[in-house]
Image (cartoon, rainbow, N blue to C red):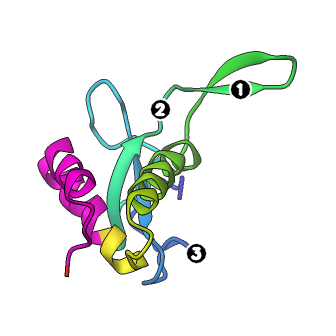
Amino acid sequence: GNGGNSGMSYPASYPSVMSVAAVDSRSYNRASFSQYNGQVEISDPGVKVESTIPGNKYASWNGTSMATPYVADIAALVWSYNTTCSAQQIRRILLASAAFGLGSLQRFVWQRSCPG
């Protein structure tokens, strides 16, 4: 959510949903508008993200809705390498690679195996 508080928002706070916070891509600090609570699991850039707009143009936007597609894209990429992975396994891969850097994700891709 974009409330900039620790309140729960839905659907992001449901246990089956991966809640994404927005950070500034330059400092990696939490964006002032991004919610923070125990349900937030991962973050990605959500400040001044370039996006397409009508008329074949670009504009900069802020919001957790700008951060979430990064996580969804990586989840889809991980799943494309091993379609037998469950949603929970992909969630663990994302969390491990976010905490420990791209190397964890690259190891998964090379091994093409899902974590237990």
Q: Look at the image and say whether residue 5 sits in the magenta stretch.
A: no
Residue 103, percent across and down?
A: 15, 45
How far apart marks 1 and 2 lie (CA) works out to 15 Å
The quarter holding residue 95 reads bottom left
How far apart marks 3 and 1 lie (CA) works out to 26 Å
Position of residue 53 relative to residue 95, above or below, is above
Image: magenta residue range:
92-115
Position of residue 80 relative to residue 47, above or below, is below
Residue 43, percent across and down?
A: 35, 50
How far apart marks 2 and 3 lie (CA) works out to 22 Å
Q: Is residue 37 visible?
A: no
- Between residue 66 and residue 88, name the one nearer to us: 88
Quick check: 32 left or right of 63? left
Which amino acid, mark 1? Thr
Residue 87, percent across and down?
A: 42, 76
- Between residue 109 and residue 44, name the one nearer to us: 109
Q: Residue at x 32, y 44 (%)?
A: 30
Q: Residues within 10 Å of mark 2 (few under 14, many from 20)?
A: many
Q: Tag 2's secondary structure?
A: loop
Q: Are marks 2 and 3 in contact (CB under 8 Å)?
A: no
Q: Residue at x 39, y 40 (%)?
A: 31
Circle 1 residue: 52
Q: Are marks 3 and 1 in contact (CB under 8 Å)?
A: no
Query: Residue 47 shows which numbered tag?
Result: 2
Circle 3 residue: 11
For marks 3 and 1, the one nearer the N-term is 3
Which amino acid, mark 3? Pro
Residue 38, percent across and down?
A: 30, 73
Closer mark to the observer between disc 1 and disc 2: 1
Q: How many marks?
A: 3
Which amino acid, mark 2? Val
